[in-house]
Structure formats: C-alpha cells, structure tokens
Image (tube, grey):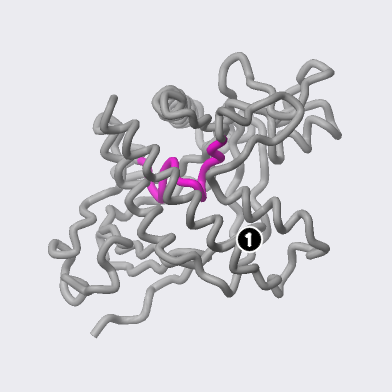
Amino acid sequence: MIPTPSYKGKVRDVYDLGDSLLLVATDRISAFDVVFEEPVLDKGKILTRISTAWFRQFPTIPNHLITDDVSKFPPPFQNEEFLKGRSVLVKKAKRIDFECVVRGYLTGSAWKEYKTEGTIAHVPYPKGLEESYQFETPIFTPARKNDSGHDENVSESVMEREVGKELFSQLKEISLFLYNTAHSLMAKQGILLCDTKFEFGLVDGKPILIDEILTPDSSRYWDASTYALGKTPASFDKQILRNWLESTDWDKNPPAPALPESLILELRKKYLELEDKITLCLSQK
C-alpha cells in the first residue's frame, strides 16, 4: 500500500525516503501561486520526460536524478502503475533558497520593473528598450524563494552576500551555461528560449541541479516565427494560462476561476508540440 505523500506541493507530491526523495509530477497546474481545479491531462508525464531529457543532456553538471525507472524504485513504490512516466527517484539535497533565473529577452516581471523603475533586477538599463528586446548577452536575475507569498526578485549582490561569493559564482556560471546551450539548440528548431529558472541544492557541500529544468512550467519558450519587438510572441509554455488569466478580472487570490476546456486543451497541445521539438533537437545535436 502506497503511503500518503510527505509533502504536497502545488503540482508535485513528494515522498521522503530518508536519503532520497520520490517526486511525483501530477497533472495539477498552477499560476500566480494558486492551484486550479482543472488538471491538464498527462502534464506530469510530459514535464517529467522533458526535464529528464535535459538532465541527461548535461552529464557534466551534477544533478539530483537517480532513476526514472519505476522497476528500480524501492518498495512499496516499485512498479506502481500510477507512478510510471511521472515519477523520479532523486538524491535529497539541502535546497539553496534562490531561483537562478536567466533572461535572454525583456519580458515578464523584468519588463514590468523596467517600465516603472528603469531597472532590471535592480540594475539601471538605457531608456527606450522595447518589450521582447533581446539582451546582447543573457542576464542573471536571481529570485529569493519565500515559504509564503510570491518569490522575490533580488539583485546579484544580495544573493552573493547571502550564499557566499564562491557558491554564487558557481551557480551563475552553471545557469548561464545551461541557458546558452539550450537556447542555441532550440533555435535550430524555430523555438526561442526566452528565459528560464534553475534550482540548486547542496550534497556534501557541493551544488547540484534539483527540481526540474527547461520545462514549459519553468521556462518561457517562444515561436521564433512570431518574434518581433514590442509584443509578446506566441508561447509554448504556461504563459498561455497567465495571459488568459490577465484578461479576466480575477485578483490572483483564491479561489481560482474555472478554466475553459479549450484553454486546457491548448496548453496540452503546446506542451506536446514543445516536447516534440526538444526531442528532435536533442537527437540531432
């Protein structure tokens, strides 16, 4: 008999197995830190496949993945049907409480900050930049993970002060390397990796990648054929949901509004299309 999860996140169920964790990606979807009633069919499986493929794309970067093979899970989880395709056994790490965000283009919260303050991640930028502007080189804009409320965008100096100079430099270098490599690969498939976030933990004092990487829930992926300055290109990610919510009068507090079936189907379709593009780009590298 499967026990109850040790922790239920917004979209994942977590089982604490001592030295390891079993992460189960559900079909729940969230936006603005609120979970919606309507699931996106197979979302957990799609994101697990995408994230696992990217982890294996970067064998020189240590990560938390032990196995995604259910037959190798410990009892009582071994070969459980509902876990297949949506679960990974991972190393337990001490989470570093910052999201390592890399941005290649000016959009989202960075665009909002720039319009009101003239800064991006608390750094002044020239006047006159347009939405979706591509930075000359991608920028690192960390965010502090808060246990309650929204994550907080902070400056590099704040993160460096709190985690230490050496660890900060490591995390920034790895994050930029991962973004630049993925951006280059996806561009060949007509997809722009707009921005993404990475999370890290410590094992024996050394950083490893944890959580998920380069999925449509942790990244913005744009259709390159629709890219133009001054507007938001068509998305292959959760921004589709956020855009719909922004068009409503919802105040971004529970209870969440009901999502139309057409929106759920569009999200699933775009996630599957993106997975196909990622699979193709990784097979042709």
Q: How many numbered dots are placed on residues in this image? A: 1
Secondary structure at badge 1 equals loop
* Nearer to me, 69 or 222: 222
Is residue 166 toward the left or the right of residue 55 in the image? right
* Nearer to me, 190 or 52: 190
What residue is shown with label 1?
33
Mark 1: few/some/many CA within 10 Å (<14, 14-19, 20+): some
- Whether the magenta-drawn stretch holds residue 193 is answered as no
Image quarter (top left, top right, bottom left or bottom right) of the N terminus: bottom left
Image quarter (top left, top right, bottom left or bottom right) of the C terminus: top left
Residue 58 image offset from top left, x and y in percent: 29, 32
* Nearer to me, 64 or 33: 33
Question: Does residue 181 appear anywhere in the picture?
Answer: no
- Segment colored magenta: 209-222
> Looking at the picture, which amino acid does disc 1 mark?
Asp
Q: Is residue 36 above or below residue 153?
A: below
Residue drawn at (57%, 28%), measured in percent from left and top? 225
Q: Quadrant of residue 137?
A: top right
Is residue 101 toward the left or the right of residue 150 in the image? left
Residue drawn at (44%, 66%), measured in percent from left and top? 41
Residue drawn at (29%, 37%), measured in percent from left and top? 62
Residue 205 image offset from top left, x and y in percent: 33, 40
Residue 133 image offset from top left, x and y in percent: 69, 23
Residue 218 image offset from top left, x and y in percent: 51, 46
